[in-house]
Image (tube, helix red, strand yellow):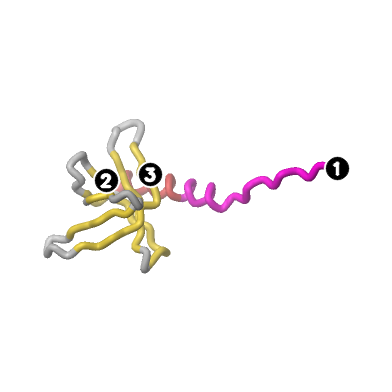
Amino acid sequence: MKINEDRQLIITKDDGTQTIMEILFTYEHPDNEKTYVLYFDPANDEEVLASRYDDEGNLYDVDGEEYEHLSAILENFLEEQEEPEPEEEEKED
């Protein structure tokens, strides 16, 4: 895994092919200090993927409690993105 300056994640598969994904956000769990990346394929932005990663850039699948926790984090993130920004109150002259 490599992250470039455009917040893209470059994944190299076992056969050497590379896939470029867009990073939604990264997250460090406050209790276990594991780091995660949530990302999506720009060709299919309906599906968000999540992986744990280490200092060497290796990606690991998440499941069970890790997956449930990240699903809740993602849901909160998406809700915050959908909230409309408060409009400035118009001043009366």
- What secondary structure is found at the residue carrying circle 1? loop
What is the C-alpha distance between the residues marked 2 and 1?
A: 52 Å
Amino acid type at image mark 3: His
Q: Hey, what amino acid is under mark 1?
A: Glu
Mark 2 or mark 3, whichever is nearer to me: 2
Residue 5 is situated, as x and y percent measured from the top left of the image, at: 32, 49
Relative to 92, 82 lies left or right: left
* Earlier-in-chain disc, 1 versus 3: 3
Membership of 88 in magenta stretch:
yes
> Residue 71 appears at what percent x and percent y?
40, 50
Badge 1: how crowded within 10 Å, few (<14), some, or many (20+)?
few
Q: Which residue is mark 3?
A: 69
Vertical relation: 42 (above or below) 79: below
Residue 29 lies in quadrant: top left
Q: Left or right? Give the position of 73 relative to 93.
A: left
Q: Is residue 54 left or right of residue 29?
A: left
Residue 52 marker: 2
For disc 1, the marked residue is 92
Q: Which residues are magenta?
A: 75-93
User: Mark 3, residues whose alpha carbon is within 10 Å: few (<14), some, or many (≥20)?
Assistant: few
